[in-house]
Each structure stands twice: as structure tokens, then as C-alpha cells.
Image (cartoon, rainbow, N blue to C red):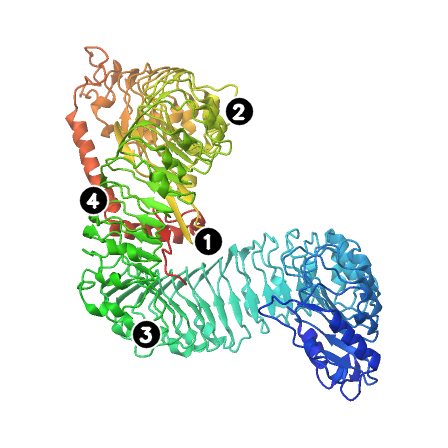
Amino acid sequence: MKTFLQYFFLLFLNITTITICGKTIPSVHSRCIKDQQLSLLHLKKSLIFNGDSYDSYPTKVISWNSSTDCCSWLGVACSTDGRVVRLDLSGESISGGIDNSSSLFNLQHLQSLNLASNMFGYGSHIPSAIGKLTNLRYLNLSYNGYSGQVIPIEISRLARLVILDISNMYGNGDPILESPNLSRLLLNLTELTELYLDGVSIPAHGTHWSIAISSSLPNLSVLSLSSCNLAGPIDQSLAKLHSLSVIRLDHNYLISGPIPGFFANFSNLREFNWGGNNISGPVPLFFSNFSKLTSLNLVDCELRGTFPKQIFQIPTLQTLDLEANGELHGSLPEFPNNGSLRSLDLSLTNFSGLMPDSIGNLKMLSTINLWRCSFTGSIPKSLANLTQLVYLDLSSNMFNGPISSIHWEKLSNMVYLRLKDNLLEGSIPSSLFSLPLLPETVLSDNQFSGKLSEFPNVSSYLVTIDLSFNNLEGQLPVSIFNFRGLESLCLSSNNFSAFPFNGPQQLKNLTYIDLSYNSLLSLYNGTDSSYSSFPQLSLLNLASNKLRTIPNFLRNQSALFSLDLSENRIEGKIPRWIWNFKDLYDLNLSCNSLGTLEAPFFYPDVHELDLHSNQLQGKLPIFLPNAFYLDYSQNNFSSIIPTDIGDFLTFHTSFLSFSSNNLHGYIPVSICNGGFGVLDLSNNSLSGMIPQCLSAKAGLGVLNLRRNNLTGTISNFEFPKFCELDTLNLGENQIKGQFPKSLANCTGLQVLNLGKNHLVDTFPCLLKNISTLRVLVLQSNKFYGRIECPKTHGTWPMLQIINLAHNNFNGEIPRRSLTTWRSMMASEGDSQAKVKFLEFSHPAGRDGVGFSFEDGITVTSKGSQMDLLKILSIFTLIDFSCNNFSGLIPKEIGEFKSLYVLNLSRNAFTGEIPSSFGNMRVLESLDLSQNKLGGQIPPQLANLTFLSFLNLSYNQLVGRIPTSTQFSTFPKDSFTGNKGLWGPPLTVDNKTGLSPPAALNGSLPNSGHRGINWDLISVEIGFTFGFGVSVGSLVLCKRWNKWYYIAMYKMVLKIFPQLEERIGIHRRHVHINQRCRH
């Protein structure tokens, strides 16, 4: 940004006289000297112009010719004696640069030279001959794409320069000012008042560049050094520049720490830009003393503390930008009448409180950006007084109350309006849809309710309406189709009951409709011929609308790109005409009751097909040659996987799921033709060996073959050197052999499940070097030996689930290893702050398509097995049961403050129960039964208030059972088999004292022959039934699930806004344009 002085300077060079630093030179009443004309014509001939430029072309030089007076040429001005004193070739699309032999340097009387904004290109240099133009007062070489050591020392000869601009922001390699250095360049430029070196790399220590400027440029008023790689600290010598009025030192990331206190002495300061530098402290109060300040930019400076309200009160302040300072607090003051403020940006800060009614006093205000702050209260009616307002973003705050009383129609200059993600309520005023320049009305994620009124006045400029995630109801007014320019209509997640499908035929530009998650039971009658005039859509989302059939009007659509009819009640066949859409990219028919696919199949260009959770049966329909995402899971397909499936898979096939069907037979080798990120064939009846080519796929992220009848060995699997596996789940098969050693190449592995197979090996110590491991399941195999790995030094800082149950491991549990499981040691607050589901995510590419796969396993908790369809990142479990571990239980386990389930039962542990177990405050299930533990039950266990399952039976415990409310809830079976143990609920106290322990008859019962305690079972059934009803409703009822998730998500983010970067809505399935396009 150039200063007013600079533009004033250029303006005067374009009128009848030339005024340069106090000297006035007439410019039009003389004819140019012949040699001056020849030099200019030779210059024109030597220039090369960029013929590929679409937005710029030469407009000045092209008009020069020898038949006219050169003093009248565009871009040229002369003195009274006919000598060229000004040359302006800015923005002429000149490429290739200007070399030292150019006739330009024959114009020795030039006082102003402007070559800015051309396209000299990478590798071009500033010619050293520039030093010949010693009369120059103004030199502008900015934005020409210079790079490397391009600034010649000869510029230092231009001792009369007043303004020097060599800024470079083209991003193709910064020019470097190193040889000569800054000191040598500026040494003779003592008359300079404005210096612009933005984007020029200046590798100098803060003391050096500060002294170089202050010692050579005593009259400097404008210092613009943005993005110069400057280092701090800033030297005190800059305090000598008393005339400084503009300071731009933004985006110099090596300058950190507080703004120097001596800056308070720059009493003439008008503009200050420090954006992108790390202040890590409060905003200095001295800014409020700058009576001439017009612009203050402190964007992304890691500001802290409270912003001084006095700065808002500076009468000359026009621009205040504090964006992206998340730890900066503050509130808005009462604004005086007729304030000068024109732009206010507090987005991504922690400003809070009310928006004062006095904001209506800022009549010049054109921009208000309060996105993602913490403002509360209502939006003041006085906002309508801001008739110059162009940009208004109040989204992602906690504004509440109605907005219907605001006279929005007065804001006729508005081009950007965002009120989404607040707590606004009441009706939506129709005036918001009549603003003549507003292209988008975005009011989503609020609490607006009631019916939409008819729109008496509509804007032809409106292209997007987004009212999603509100409580609007009734029928959509027909007048909404009077918006003839409408392209996108997003009404998702409301309670609309009817949509006038005979209306949109008027909207020829309408391409996007999202009506998902409403109650459009009566959407259409299925046969109306008027649907032939329905506009040609590119995206239609009718998910979760109680539809019972596929809308018939879709037959006439020819431009559909994405169609979502998921989570409805559609039955019967998938019609073959649905494959006729030549541009269809994404089709989602999941979560319906569809039974068959109508043959014959075509070969459409569909890339994402989601048919999961239907009742489809028969053979697998493999007919999509370009499938990127294919999900047939949770259906009733009962066939083999076609041997030629590889003919329909390509390197771009990233997601393939046939999970939870009735498939049988072998896994064909041709399946390896896919370039999978995710391959899920789990929960079928597949048999035979796993194709070795699957283990060799470098890009495979998830391989899930769990719960089949697969056989053979995986010992010789060769996982590639740069293995990208995130999840390997081969559990519950018939696999034999040893642990595959090449799995050590999968250094990003998070989930490994080999449980319930027939593997025979020692503990796989090679896994210790995989620091990303979160879930390890080896249960029910034939692993043996100790689990200590003395020769490895790796750690599992992220481990949250380890299940080694039902093997033949022995020896002691290594204490040193336990101390590295830091994820289990996190306090409750730390773990809750990171809550999410474990998943493999495929990021969206250029086509905007991405997906995620959520991991699931089976665990034993509270005495029962359960399937975890999704694994929360805060769920932690240790299960070492049914092995031959011995020795003392390590007290280090008690440091696992975020552990939920601990099962060490059926081993040979001795000694006492560690009292440190009382530290595991979130523990819900503890099973230490059938060991050889002695001593008393530590009273610290009474502190475990979340403990709902406890089994200490069949040990050698003695003494009284601790008395606490928590222990009184456990049944007798939790303590039986300990001869020296007594007290409720094992024995009953009497009036004369406490009864001695009852004699126990019989020996330790074998598993599978213990009696059933119906008291315990009834409690567990009751809990399970209640839990199942509540959780099942959230899991199976998609509308409840969505409402609950969104409500909890928004509530948590209002309390902890910083979590939004960590928590997202994680879906397993394809997400294409899930929200309305803005």
C-alpha cells in the first residue's frame, strides 16, 4: 500500500505541470528534443511484451510513434526545454527485463521513473546502469518478480531520491539484499523520505538494519519492510526518526517480543502494521496517545491480556484489525458520534460482551468482522444506521434474541452477510432477502423458528439461501422461487413438511438443493408430468425425509452430479434408469429398505456409490469401472466375490467395503488391482488364504478381514518398506503361523487386531518401535513367554487398549514399559479435551471428496464381551487375563489416571493389591479374580466412585471389606473365595460385634461351572437394557443421533472454543459438499 504522498506525487506528474520536491516544471507547452524521442522509440523497439497476459496489456507504449510529439505520449512528461523528466511504464506487461544497454539510460534528465507491476520474470535483475539517472527523485521498480541478488550498489548513487520502491510480492523467490548490504545501499540516500522494500529478504540482525536506516535516512517518514525476514531485536537508534508516520514491519517472523517502548515517541504516526509478528503480550496503551493514527494492524501477533478500550476512542482511527489473536480479550466500548472508524476486524479473538447500541454512531463503517468471538446478547437495532456497511460477519458467536425488528432494508450496500452459528431466534425477516447487492443470505445453525413468510420483495442478485440447522417448519413459501438468480438452496435440518416441487421450474439457474433432515413425507405424487420442466440440478440431497419411493421427477434429470436419498424408508428396487445420468458422480442410497437392483446394469461414470444398510440380496453387483468409493456393507448379498472384480478396480479405487453380508468363497487375487485406502471384507464367511498381494500394497491404510473363516499363515507376509497401514484387523479367523516380522515397516500403525486366531510366537517386541500404536489385540492365540523387551527402547505414548488375554504369557509385568504409556496417565480433563473416534481419514482431494473409516473391536468389560463399533480416543483398557503372569502387580498401574477397564484375572499374581489403584478415579471395571493376592483390600479403592464392576473373588485376601457407598453396591460374588475376608456383603454384622469369616467349603471352581447369581444378572440386564434403549436410539435413529451430536457439539464448543480444531463430525461414509456451498 502506497502512501497518500506518493499518489499525490504521481498525480501532479500527470497534469499540466510537474512538481518534484518543490521545483515546478511545465510539461506540455514544449516539444521534445529529437534525441529524447529517438531514445524512447529505441526503448519501445527493445521491449518484449507478455502475449499470454489475459488481464493486462500495453496501453501506453503501443501508441508511441515518430509522427507525434513525444512530450504528448502516454506515460511521458517533459520539462520546459523539451527533455523527458517523467516516464511511467507501470503495468505494461513488459517481460524479460531491461538490460544495461537500453536507451532508457540516455534519458539523463529523468526525475521520475515508474516501471512497477510488469512481468520481468524469474531471474531478471535491476540493471546497474540505473545509477546513471542521477537526477531521479522518484524510483518505483516494485512487483516485477525479481529474485536473488538483484539490487545493484549503483542505486546508492541516486543521492537525490525522495521515494524508493523495490517491493516484491510475486512469490517466485524473494530478491535478496545482502551484497550490497542495506548500509551500503542507503549510505548516500540522505534525502529519502519513503522507503518500500516489502518482500525483499534482508538477512541482517536487528541492530544492523535499524542502525543502517536511522543513520542514513534522518528525514524518513514511511518505513515499509513487510515480509523481509528481518530479525530482532529492534535497535533503540530508530527513535531518532522523529518524522516517521508509517511503520510497516509485518510478517517478519524473526521479530518477536513486545513492541519497543520508544515507539511511543512517534507522535506523527498514522499507520502501524505489525501483523504476523509474535508479540506474546498485551497491546501497549501508548497507541491511544497517537492522535493522528488512522490504521492499526496487529493480525496474528499472539496478543494476550485485555485490549485497551481507549484505542477505540482515537478520533482519527479508520482501520482496526486484530484478527487471529485467540488469547486477546476485550469488549466493545460506547462509540462517540460520527466516529471515523471504517473497518473493524476482531475475528478469531476472545472479545466478548455485548455489541453496544452506540455502534450505530459509526456512520462511516463499511466492514465489521466478529467471526468466532464470544459476543453475547442481541444484535442492536442501530445496526441499520450503518448505511455504508458492505461486509458484516457476526457468525460463530452467542448472539441471541430476534432480529426481525432491525431495518435490514436500509443496508442497501451490503455484499457480504453472515449470521450463522449463533443463538438467534424468532422469525426470519423477509427484508434480508431483498438487499439489492447481497449474493448470499446465510442464517444457518441458529434457533429460528416458525414458518417462513412470503417474500414481497426479492433480489435478483441473490444466488444462495442457507437456512439449514434451524427450527423452521411448515411449507416453504412459493414466492421463494421468485429469486430468478437463485443457484443454491440449503434448507437442511429443519422441520419443513412440504416443498412446492412445481415451483422450481421457474428457477433456470438453480443447481443445488439440500432438503435433508426434514419431514417431507408428502414430497411428490410420483407421476405429475409437470416435473419435466423441473430445473436441471447438479446436487440434490433428500436424506432423512421419510420418503418411501425414489422421486419420479429424477427421470428427467440429465445434469445430476450428486444425489443423496439416504436414511429414508424407500423400499423395492433400485431402478435401472438411475444409472442413465451421464454426469452422476456420487449416489447415496444407504440406510433404506431397498431389496434388489433392477437389471440390466449399465456402466455409468459413478465414482462414489453408497448402498450400505439396506436389504439388498443375491450376487454382488460389480459394474462400476471408475468407482472411487464403493460401500455394499450391511446387506444380504450371498455370493462369492467375483474373480474378475479386478477388472472394475483401478488405482483410484480408495474405499471398498463388502462388510457384514453373507459372502463366501475365496478372496480373489485380482482384488489387489484396487489402490485402496480402505478394504473392509469383515463379518462374512470368506475362507481360504489371504492373498499376499494385499500385504504388499504400499498405499493401503485399512485392511479389515475380521470375523471370517480365513486360514493359512501370515508369517511370510511382506509389508512394504514404506508401509502406510493405519489399521490391520485380522481377528476372529483361523490364521496360523508366527507374527509377521515385516509389520515393523508399518511405522504409522494405530490399530492391530490379531485376536482369536491360532498364532504361535513370543511377544512381538518389534511393535515397540511403532510409537503411533493405540490399540493392540493379541487375545486368544498361543503367544508365550515374557512380554519384556530388554533390547528395545521404543515406547507407546499413545497406547490406549492392550488385550493379551487367553495366551500363555508368563513372568512379571515389566514396570519400565508401563511408565511409557502416557496416554493412560493423562488426567481426566486432558483426555476429555481430545475426545474423538479413532478413524482412518482420507483427505478430500481436488474433487472435494473425502471419507473416514472408524475402527471397532470386541472387548471384555464388566464381565461381559461387547462390540465397540467405534473406539473413543478416551476409552482405555488393559486385559492381561487368562495367562500365567506372576509376581507382584506393579504399583505403576495406579498412575493410569484415565484407565477405564483393568482385567488381570486368572493369573498367578501374588502380594497385595497396590494402594495406588485408588488414583484411577475414572476406573469403571476392575477384575483381579482367581490370583494369589493376599493382604487387605486397600481402603483407597473406596475412592473409585465410577467403579461399577468389581471382582476380587478367589484370592487370599483377609480383613474387613471397606465400608463405602460404592462397595455396598457390589454383590457377594465380587468377594467370594477369600477365606479371610469378611464384612458386608460377604458376611452380615450383628449386634454383639462383627461376625467372623464364614468357613468356605469346596475349592476354586473351574470356569464354566460356577453358579449363576441372578441378583447380579438382573442388575446387569437392567443396566444393559436401559443403556441399549438410550444409546440404541442415538445409534439407530439417525435424526436423534444428528440432533444429539450437534447439540452437544455446539454446547462443548461454547465452553471450550479451542476444541473446534480438534473435534470434528466424524463420519465413516463419503462426505461430498455436506454443507451448503457459499
Callout 4 crowding tier (Cα within 10 Å): few <14, some 14–19, many ≥20? some
Q: Which residue is mark 1?
A: 846
Q: Which residue is mark 4?
A: 615
Q: Which residue is mark 3?
A: 430
Q: Left of 525 or right of it: where is 385?
A: right
Q: Residue furthest bottom?
A: 29
Q: Is residue 857 visible?
A: yes
Q: Residue at x 31, y 58 (%)?
A: 581
Question: How far apart are labels 1 and 2 at the CA level?
Answer: 41 Å
Instruction: Give the residue type at disc 2.
Output: His
Q: Residue furthest left?
A: 1014
Instruction: Give the residue type at disc 4.
Output: Gln
Q: Which residue is mark 2?
A: 793
Nearer to us: label 1 or label 2: 1
Counting from the top left corner in percent of width and height, residue 1059 is at 43, 48
Q: Quadrant of the C terminus?
A: bottom left
Counting from the top left corner in percent of width and height, residue 1072 is at 37, 54
Callout 1 crowding tier (Cα within 10 Å): few <14, some 14–19, many ≥20? few
Image marks 1 and 4: residues in contact by CB distance under 8 Å = no
